[in-house]
Amino acid sequence: MKLEVFDVANFFRSKEQMTHKKLQKLVYYAYAWYIALYNEDKGNIQNKLCENTVFEAWVHGPVCRKLYDSFSNNYGMVDKYKAKINPLINGELKKFLEKIYKIFGKYTGDELESMTHQEFPWKNARNNLSPSEPSNEPILESDMFVYYNSL
C-alpha cells in the first residue's frame, strides 16, 4: 500500500485549519523535498512520497489538481482534520513530515506562494509566462531533485 496525496494533506491538516493555498504548498514542499532526499539521480526518480501525484505551475504556485478539485469548494479554508492519520505515516516518514511542517508551517499561504515563485522548478515550468497567465504545465520531478539538492 502506498500513500496518496490526500494522506499527506491530511497529515498537515491535522496540525491546524489552513487556507487551501497553504495546504497545497506544504504538500508540494513535502513532495519535492522527499524526491530530493530519497533519490540518487535526477534521471531515475523512483522514490516518491505519494503515487500518481503531479504538481502544475499555476499562477499562485505549485498546485496538485487532485487536491484542488477536492478542496476548491471550501471557500479558501480547509478544516482541521480530526480523523486517524494513515498508519503508513510513522517512524522516519512521520519525522520527515514533522520537519517539513516545522520549517514551512509557520508561513502563510501567500508567503509560501512567494517562496515558490523564486524557485527554479516552478519558474522553469512556467517558461517565461506572464505572472497572471494560466498554466497547467507539470513541474518536473527532475527539476525538484536538482534544485532542492542544491540547497
Image: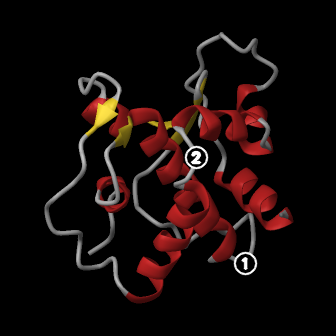
Instruction: Kindly give the residue lying farthest to the right in the view shown.
Output: 150
The image quadrant that residue 66 belongs to is top left
In the picture, the quarter occupied by the C terminus is: bottom right
Q: Residue at x 32, y 53 (%)?
A: 13
Q: Is residue 72 left or right of residue 27?
A: left
Looking at the picture, how far across and down is residue 21, in whole percent? Answer: 47, 34
- The tag on residue 145 is none
Q: Residue at x 50, y 36 (%)?
A: 63
The image quadrant that residue 132 belongs to is top right
Q: In this view, does 53 lie to the left or right of 111?
A: left
Secondary structure beneath dot 2 equals loop
**Number of other residues with Cα within 10 Å of mark 1, as a class: few under 14, some 14 to 19, many 20 or more:** few
Task: Note whether residue 65 is visible.
Answer: no
Instruction: Kindly give the residue lying farthest to the left in the view shown.
Output: 83
Front residue of this view, candidates 100 and 42: 100
Task: Note whether residue 101 is visible.
Answer: yes
Q: Residue at x 38, y 57 (%)?
A: 12
In the picture, the quarter occupied by the N terminus is: bottom left
Q: In this view, does 81 lie to the left or right of 6?
A: left
Question: In the figure, 135 relative to 81: above or below?
Answer: above
Looking at the picture, how far across and down is residue 148, in whole percent? Answer: 75, 60
What is the CA distance from the residue labelled 1 to the residue labelled 2?
30 Å
Q: Earlier in the sequence, mark 1 or mark 2?
A: 1
- The tag on residue 40 is 1
Question: In the figure, 50 relative to 117: above or below?
Answer: below
Residue beneath disc 2:
107
**Number of other residues with Cα within 10 Å of mark 2, as a class: few under 14, some 14 to 19, many 20 or more:** some
Q: Which amino acid does label 1 sit on?
A: Glu
Q: What residue type is labelled 2?
A: Tyr
Question: In the figure, 95 relative to 74: above or below?
Answer: below
